[in-house]
Amino acid sequence: MKKNIIYLLTLLLLCCFRQNIHAEYFRNLNLGNGLSQFSVMSICQDSLGRMWFGTHEGINIYDGHHIRYYKGWVESGPGEKLWLGNSIDYIHCGNDGNIYFIADRNLFTYDIRCERFSQLTTGNQTSALTTTDTAIWYTRHDTLFVWDTQKKQSLYVRNLPDNNITALTITRNGNIYIGTDNGIYIAQNATDPNMKHQLQNKGVHTIFESSSREIWIGTYMDGLYRIINGKLTNVPYSPHDGKGTSDRQIRQFTEDSQHNIWFGTFSGLEKYNPQTGLYTKIQIPQHVGGLSHPSLFALYTDRQGIIWLGSYYGGVSYFNPGKEEYLHYNYQSHAQPGIYYSYIGEMVQDNERNLWISTDGGGISQIGPGWNLLKQFTAGKSDGLPHNNIKSIVYDPHRNNLYIGTYLGGLSRYDIRQHTFHNYRNRADNPGDIIYHLEIWNDKLYLTTRKGLFCLDPDTDTFQFLSNTSSFCEYFDISPQGTLYIMGWNYVDIFSLTDNTLTRRISMTPYDCYGNLSHILATDQGAYISTLGSGIYFYNAKSHEVTHYTHANSQLPSDYCYNIARVDEHSIAISTDKGITLFTPEKRQASTIVLPAEIPLIYGGGLYVSPQHEIYIGGPKGITMVPAESFRSNAAHNSPLYFSRLWINNRLVTPLSADNILDQTLPFTHKLKLKHNQNNCIIEFTYSDHKEQSRRQTFEYKLEGFDDKWISTSANEIHYTNLDPGNYTLKVRPQQGSEEQTISLQIHISTPWYSTIWAWMLYLITIGAGSFWFVRNKLAKRALALSLEKERFEKQHIEEVNRAKLVFFTNVSHEFRTPLTLIISHLDALLQEQLPVQLYNKLLKIKQNTQYMTNLITELLDFRKFTQNHVILHLASQDICLMLEEIYLTFTDYAQQRKIDYTFESEPKNILCWIDRTQMEKVFFNLLSNAFKYGA
């Protein structure tokens, strides 16, 4: 009896411990997430919901997706550098929305609109910082100052009685609390001349005012103090009974939405519940989501109620004190040493809410309600587990037995009450050594092996062979009506257990099923079939219709679905390669929780839904538990959605960039003005919802002026390339979100100069002028062509007239030649007679002139030959002096008649030349004729 009471008390404590773990499951950010350094000394949140972490190596900004940090030298303006320092001890968000922090004991500010750091104090003497709704307060050496955010200057407040300032708090009613290495100083207001000194010789680490206006004081080594209604009390050090703290080093405080006070200590996290008045130390093993490091220096509660913790050497931890979306149990850290397993397969829960898990190579284990490993069974004993490779397990609640199907070890039954195994391997009616799957229906065990389908009656412990099945029937399920659905390679066989007959085979090929079948879930209406690459199918047993659910038509995160399990009458749980999903087929709605990369989901991993609607997922790294209510959170989309960063032509744009695109950061920019060659944009938007961070968020975006409809996306970047000049409006909202949840950004892409109205006017003028010139030039060429044609015609006419004249003169010349020939013949006859000398000479001259005239007529006849290039020169060696003398004698009588002095002189007397005598005589006759004609 005593033993049973102890067991019940232990079980009760384990259950309570399990509830605490569920409430405080910690997630972590460390160097792997981009944190600049492990030691986180201060935390705050800005107006955009981003978290700021101060470390020993710079300041970090976390937007829910990425961490950016600044340390050492930072940009403070175009071409300007500022030494920021390393150790960040205080961070606060001011009433102007900017971030104020102390780095290496100097005060700095960060303008979140311009992304610019500024240094406010120098000399490394700034020791404490706090903010109120109206001002920024800080201490420097032994003086208290206020920073005027409007005038951007420091205002002196008062001197302080000590210069070793360690903490500063301004209460809501204006009281000033100064923490030092020598206690605490309290002033009623800034002008109070008498400061009260308490806790002398005690080093004060932090001062905190709660929502009930109670003052909490943490000391370095002297424990916790509280001031209630002006009375200072010491909280006792009492680590075991809940009446005091568990550590004397109290570091930092924060308050949650339920008014619980949380504080960090040297050894971990503690909580004070004002309703019960009890102090609790949060002691969670690290393998189920405990703190990564116990020494806490920073605590902060954000606007969603998430509590953030900064540890000395473990980075950042955070949790939701009201509810966590999932819990991960690292099974490997507590598994039996030397036992290898690939993944955790099927799981069941017994009557005591213990979780039984099967492994691929590591046997079976029993995990208690507090996630403590109660038992682990592996092969090796003759009366124990027959094999470590477990294919299937099923629990018989009426007999408190666990049936185990193994690979190569056959079927085994474990009596939980008696702690004994019964193996069926050596029996004559053994169904086989390779067991694929087990199910219980109508108080009987059904199993598939390589030999077929069998039924085991637990009362008689005998097997019955039912039917042959596929050689590799890895899974089947049974509906409440007794319809057994057997999963094949790409088909499903339907088997009736009432009459042991195969009623139908459903081929999945006609339904565009390209991937292998991965799991099957029988319901009272039919069966759900999951696939690797083709989503989910539902077979309606009444209408024999098949409905297809995919990523494209039903909000599934992926078409690679590993396992399915029933949650309630409306919903099913699905494990996919993109996370764990709660799916409502009637509405085609899915809500997905994305697990971290260190918790992968794989094909073959188990999926089990407990009666408490807790979803257990097995994987290679342990077990993940997700309460079904985590999928139905009403807190989604209550954090600000904003545009966070901008890339133009694959280059990050900031207010400090030289291109002057942004005057202030993108979250505070409502309109972008871009050049025509800045039309390739990547716009990042951020949704700083740390409470629902693991849920798969789906958004819609639309670029008005470019897109015709909303585009769904799960990414947080939007890409547009080669946008035409014009005005656009980019809108982003959560999936099916309201207008109030929609953010917008106007984008103007300017028209290039060559496409402006002035350019087009210039183009029109140029084209008009060019057209005018072209037409005019054409007309001028046309006129010139007509003129040339006319001229050619006239020339041709003149040539024809000249040709007619030439023909006429040629004919007349022939007529002249005949009488001249007769005259010459008569003269030759006369000259042969004996005539007086004087008469003879006259007749001789007449003959010569007649001969010349005949030559002229001959020349006229030869003119036509000249025009047709038919004249041939007859060259011969001639005495040109003799020829000229003869021509000279021809004109002597004419010269005497005209009384012209006419002589012939030649020196030398004879000159031989190659000439055509006839043509040369014509030349000289013409010269002398013109000379006598015009010389007078």
Image (cartoon, grey):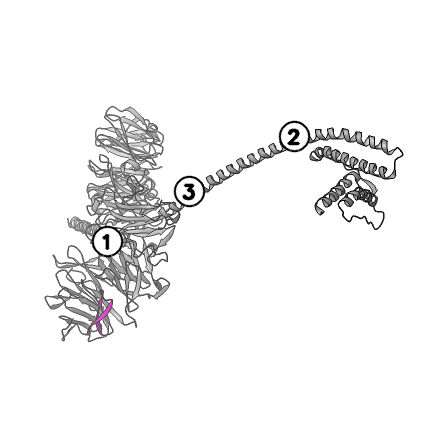
The 10 Å Cα crowd at callout 1, few under 14, some 14 to 19, many 20 or more, is many
Q: Which mark is residue 866?
A: none
- Whole-percent x, y for residue 617 in the image: 28, 43
Q: Mark 3 and 2 residues: CB-CB less than 8 Å, in contact?
A: no
- Whole-percent x, y for residue 436 in the image: 32, 34
What is the CA distance from the residue labelled 2 to the residue labelled 1?
123 Å
- Whole-percent x, y for residue 824 in the image: 81, 32
N-term-proximal mark, 1 vs 3: 1
Q: Amino acid at mark 3?
A: Gly
> Considering depth in this image, is 840 or 43 the residue closer to the camera?
840
Magenta residue check for 152: yes
The reply to whether residue 291 is in sight is: no
Q: Amino acid at mark 2?
A: Ala
Q: Which residues are magenta?
A: 140-156
N-term-proximal mark, 2 vs 1: 1
- Whole-percent x, y for residue 645 in the image: 32, 52
Q: Residue furthest left?
A: 229
Q: Decide if residue 912 is on the left or right side of residue 337.
A: right
Please name the residue that numbered disc 3 is placed on.
Answer: 768
> Considering depth in this image, is 74 or 31 the residue closer to the camera?
74
